[in-house]
Image (cartoon, helix red, strand yellow):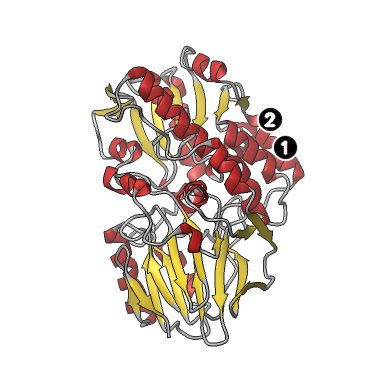
């Protein structure tokens, strides 16, 4: 086997790994680069392999940094099967068309307002491309062996990150390799913990929080404090959320705060993300993967007003607080939340609350770094609102939780590759594994190819 790292090296986005044998080319994950401009430009660059020569794609989960390049791969010639869990397939059916819609919408907006350097501005791919990609999805059950041909076998195991997220294990008669994707947390309020894996000859491990530990304090208490403080100022709490995972978690926390009396029952809550609304409905189909029962799932819907139309979304910007708005995207890199930031970030009585990892180059990272203004649609918007972070709502395991998960291996892999982390985090994860477990560890470079004996 040979493994080439086509993404998620030196960054938390763009996950793509090409596994080659004498007879098969398998792409594990097919994600978009996000954040810094030099990363986003890679989405437009030609892959170092002809997509038509890829035999199959395997997805660890549905988040766009792991699945969002798939429509472009299909547009450029890929026609094989896309293996994933059933939950991932259902989520991709809403996330990939939404990703295409956002790109078409942003291109149209840029052309109408004339702020793009490209004439005309074009989307990376269209909704038609997304639908063509969805036709190739091939759902498989967890813990079932799937024949990929050429002597290769695939097995998916629950990783606890979001609905459908999986560890991907591919093995032949001679060797095996495990792709962690994103690893969930042991005590997540929504998701069940990641399953333990006992053996793999080679391992790719994520390192999003490779240099950090999640705080031990109660995120629910901090959320109540931030909401009550903003309500006292008659302000608006804008929460950029990932439509899958964080949106549902925040709704559940707000439900708990209201029912306990920690925040006022009558504070209006709006979920302004059609994709998050759809994902919340899908949550009710997969009780085996998460901790909520049917009644608790229904409570998510009762907690918020579900906003679907563009007209409803625009109308929110004319309302006065107090109120809470949950809107995608989670890093404020696009979507409806950007329009809410234009409306509410300039006012000092409001709060912008981030609840997940913010990649370098995103508006979220800039605001948390204290930016006095952010660029939206070609103009700079002042940031006078309070900017807050609740870091321990992340769906990614921190380095201690990853080390604990790695301790479940019965023997060390021949080599462990650190991926899906910004440079400092990836190198810190390397050091932690070497010092605690004494494994052979490497941080690969972009486009690096390694041979797996």
Circle 1 residues within 10 Å: few <14, some 14–19, many ≥20: some
Q: Measured from the top left, where is residue 46 in percent x and y?
A: 36, 53
Q: Measured from the top left, where is residue 453 in percent x and y?
A: 43, 86
Question: Which residue in the structure is indicated by mark 2?
Answer: 302
Question: Which residue in the structure is indicated by mark 1?
Answer: 298
Spatial CA distance of label 2 from label 1 is: 7 Å
The answer to whether one can see residue 181 in this image is no
Query: What SS does tag 2 mark?
Result: helix
Mark drawn on residue 449: none
Query: What SS does tag 1 mark?
Result: helix
Circle 2 residues within 10 Å: few <14, some 14–19, many ≥20: few
CB within 8 Å, label 2 to label 1 = yes
The answer to whether one can see residue 16 in this image is yes
Q: Nearer the viewer, residue 330 or 323?
A: 330
Q: Measured from the top left, where is residue 250 in percent x and y?
A: 55, 39
User: Is 147 situated left or right of 27 in this image?
Assistant: right
**Residue at the image position 40 percent from the left and 48 percent from the top:** 357
Q: Nearer the viewer, residue 331 or 31?
A: 31
């Amino acid at each position: 086997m040979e493994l080439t790292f086509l993404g998620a090296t030196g960054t938390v986005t763009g996950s793509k790994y090409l596994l080659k044998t004498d007879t098969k080319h398998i792409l594990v994950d097919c994600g978009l680069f996000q954040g810094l401009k030099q990363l986003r430009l890679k989405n437009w660059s030609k892959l170092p392999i002809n997509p038509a020569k890829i035999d199959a794609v395997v997805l660890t989960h549905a988040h766009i940094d792991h699945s969002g390049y798939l429509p472009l791969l299909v547009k450029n010639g890929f026609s094989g099967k896309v293996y994933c869990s059933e939950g991932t397939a259902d989520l991709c059916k809403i996330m990939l068309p939404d990703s295409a819609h956002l790109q078409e919408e942003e291109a149209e907006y840029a052309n109408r307002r004339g702020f793009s350097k490209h004439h005309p501005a074009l989307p990376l791919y269209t909704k038609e491309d997304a639908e063509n990609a969805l036709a190739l999805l091939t759902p498989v059950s967890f813990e079932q062996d799937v024949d990929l041909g050429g002597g290769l076998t695939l097995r998916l195991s629950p990783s606890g990150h979001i609905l459908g997220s999986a560890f991907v294990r591919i093995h032949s008669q001679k060797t095996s390799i495990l792709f962690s994707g994103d690893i969930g947390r042991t005590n997540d309020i929504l998701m069940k913990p990641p399953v333990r894996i006992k053996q793999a000859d080679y391992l790719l491990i994520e390192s999003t929080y490779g240099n950090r530990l999640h705080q031990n304090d109660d995120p629910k208490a901090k959320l109540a404090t931030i909401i009550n403080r903003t309500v006292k100022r008659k302000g608006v709490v804008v929460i950029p959320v990932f439509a899958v995972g964080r949106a549902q978690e925040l709704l559940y926390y707000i439900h708990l705060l209201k029912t306990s009396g920690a925040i006022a029952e009558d504070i209006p809550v709006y979920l302004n993300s059609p994709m998050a609304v759809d994902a919340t409905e899908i949550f009710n189909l997969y009780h085996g993967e998460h901790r909520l029962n049917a009644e608790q799932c229904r409570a998510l819907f009762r907690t918020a007003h579900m906003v679907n139309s563009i007209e409803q979304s625009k109308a929110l910007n004319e309302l006065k607080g107090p109120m809470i708005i949950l809107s995608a995207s989670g890093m404020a890199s696009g979507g409806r939340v950007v329009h809410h930031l234009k409306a509410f970030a300039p006012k000092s009585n409001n709060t912008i609350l981030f609840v997940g990892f913010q990649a370098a180059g995103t508006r979220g990272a800039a605001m948390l770094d204290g930016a006095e203004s952010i660029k939206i649609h070609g103009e700079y918007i002042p940031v006078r609102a309070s900017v807050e972070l609740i870091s321990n709502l992340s769906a990614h395991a921190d380095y201690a939780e990853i080390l604990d998960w790695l301790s479940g291996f019965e023997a060390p892999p021949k080599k462990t590759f650190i991926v899906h982390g910004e440079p400092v985090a990836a190198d810190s994860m390397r050091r932690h594994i070497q010092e605690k477990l004494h494994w052979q560890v490497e941080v690969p470079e972009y486009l690096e190819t390694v041979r797996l004996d």
